[in-house]
Amino acid sequence: MSFPQAFVDPSSVAVVGATEDRAKWGHWLATGALAGADRRQVWLVNRRAAQVLGQSCRPTVGDLPRAPDLVALCVPPPHVLPVVRDALAKGCRAFLAITAGLGADETELAALLRASGARMIGPNSLGLFNAAARLRLAWGTFTPGRLAIVSQSGQVGSEIAGLGARAGLGVSRFYSVGNQLDVGAVDVLESLVSDEHTGTVALYLESFADGARIVTALAALRRAGKHALLLTTGASEGSRLLARSHTGSMTSSLDVVDAACRAAGALRVATPRELVDAARVLDVTAPPRGHRVAVVSDSGGQGGIAADLAADRGLRAPVFSEPLRARLRDLLPAAASVANPVDLAGAGEADLRVYAQVTEVVAASGEVDSIVLSGYLGCYGEDSPSLVDAESAVIDRLGRRQGSETAHVPLIVHSMSAASPAVTRLREHRVPVFDTVDAALGALGRVTRLGAGPRPAPAAERIGAAVPAPGYWAARTFLTELGIAMPGARRVTDAAGFAAACAALRPPLVLKAGWIEHKSEHRAVRTGLDPATADAVFREMYERLGPGEYVVEEQDTRPGVVELLIGARRDRDFGPTVTVGHGGVLAELWQDVAVELAPVDRRTAAGMLDRLRSRRLLDGWRGQPPVDLDALIDAVVTVSETIAASPGLADIEINPIRVGSEGALAVDALVVPRAEDVVARAASEPSGAHRPRTTTEEQETSREHVH
């Protein structure tokens, strides 16, 4: 169902539970509603009061002259259901429920709404606000602006609004979605795509039950020219705990959330302050086009600190070219540093105009994507009244640059003054200004990550694959049919078959108990076998693990290979994901992985590799040749497309995939169907069907190890 206009700009509002008591919700909703009474009809409902705030009251919604567009409920929990029934009978179809603690009544309330086609925000909502429509049904007041706030926690949303107001950042719309009994955050996000009054969206969520739709909505916001900043406390944890692969144990819930943000062109932040600082920058400028930053300061110490912070936040302060340094030398004293960071070396005190001159020269150079001006600017007029006019003129000149041909190079100012007239003037010119350099660089580093925009969705080229039977041999067959190379191998079940396999394959050989998922933990894999030792190894493993499907493989002995893993999972909330990382038996120790929503194209797969700490191993390390990156990228793309196109699969893992200069070879793998498919397959098997013996204890130990 679409997002009702009643939650945006209703023609009439009824506040049920309106009261004169300022300590109660009914007072705040009534005063807010009445503030827009010249735009819409406002009715107050209270069984016990004939008048509230100078306005006459009706005892019930049923006593109103007609059905209001929107009914705001701030009544005790036992009264919510009766009021909703009364309002539905009157013809109301939109509700805002402030009341919390409904308990079992929520189930009946949801059924009532569905049966009548009505919509509700809440229960347990802090309210809603729309500056353009002069609609305020919430506790407190809001400063109008261009930041929309959508929050699962009303108080977190309120904190964001308060921090924004103190920083000069106003709110376009505010929605506290509460328990999301009916209307969810994603419904609100979709409604904001076309809102001309919103520039940035602040989103706080604790759960992502409709993750794929949320990603689509966030991407639509970005394509509409809006930015989304996500604050969360950790989500989708349940899906990680359900994973049986090593990949599942190595990726956190926030890894998947971050992947969703990258796919959508959104940005996750860690605190309300981080969110507001980033929103302050986005409110006045577009994200930088790249990570190159110039640091300009009137203090060598402050410039050095800023440069260090820039590097820590993913920015790069490149050394300026000689022509640019020469132009800066013409402006600055001989003692000035002009390589980047730039130290004005007292030039500002001699002539305040140098702040603007240096900024203009650096911005026009084409050598940087953003500029941080750090230090005393903003304090001159505050400390020396005779400098007020000169400082104001410099700030006006910096402000005019915002509309010039170099405006695509954002300027961020760190001033040692928090609220001087000069700082206020900077903000009036829409120049982001912060009173600490770490806040300035933190905000710049975060918004720079937004520069890429939403990730283009790869074309759906792969047809869904049939779910393989359990076991390693079936997984091998599955992957080779996808085009992923694996060593020569034979499947065996007894000593005679094993001997035949050894005679047919090239030693050294590897023996695996194919039905055990994590073989190293159970001594279910042996490597380096030759004809002299192989028979004894097979007999020992067979006696210990029992009959089943064993696999004999040719061991990959190529020199200079790098072991990685490729994993794909079906996340409970966001759907298919793909992971690549440092592999082998120490994969969980190094925890070096990159995650994206699946499917990915070759460019995104290459970017995943670039994020790994172990990336340099792929280019050749200590004399080793570089590996075949194309083969590795092909495998990542193939696995990602397969999980995306195959709804019957829960997990694919190749660990390790050994990549050398002459290609990539997968030497162990796990393919896991969705749990419901496992149940269906078990139910379809004839009674007494043979399965390889693996004790319950061994299986459970394996899963515990992963989790």
Image (spheres, rainbow, N blue to C red):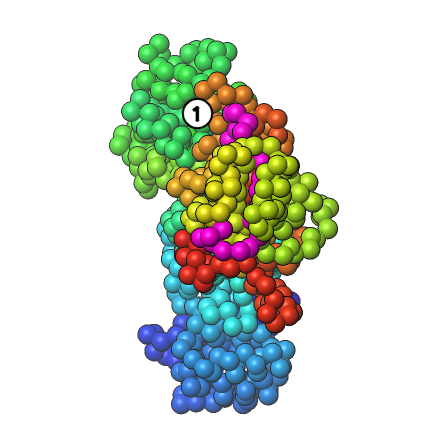
Q: Nearer the viewer, residue 468 or 582?
A: 468
Q: Is residue 107 above or below residue 427?
A: below
Magenta stretch holds residue 548: yes
Boundaries of the magenta span:
542-571
Which quadrant holds the N terminus?
bottom right
Q: Is residue 279 visible?
A: no
Quadrant of residue 113 within the rendered picture? bottom right
- Residue at 47% x, 89% y: name it: 59
Q: Is residue 416 above or below residue 473?
A: above
Q: Is residue 89 above or below residue 572?
A: below
Disc 1 marks which residue?
317
Q: Residue 552 placed where, x, y %?
A: 57, 42
Q: Is residue 651 left or right of residue 440?
A: right
Q: What amino acid is at disc 1?
A: Ala
- Residue at 61% x, 72% y: name it: 687
Q: How many marks?
A: 1
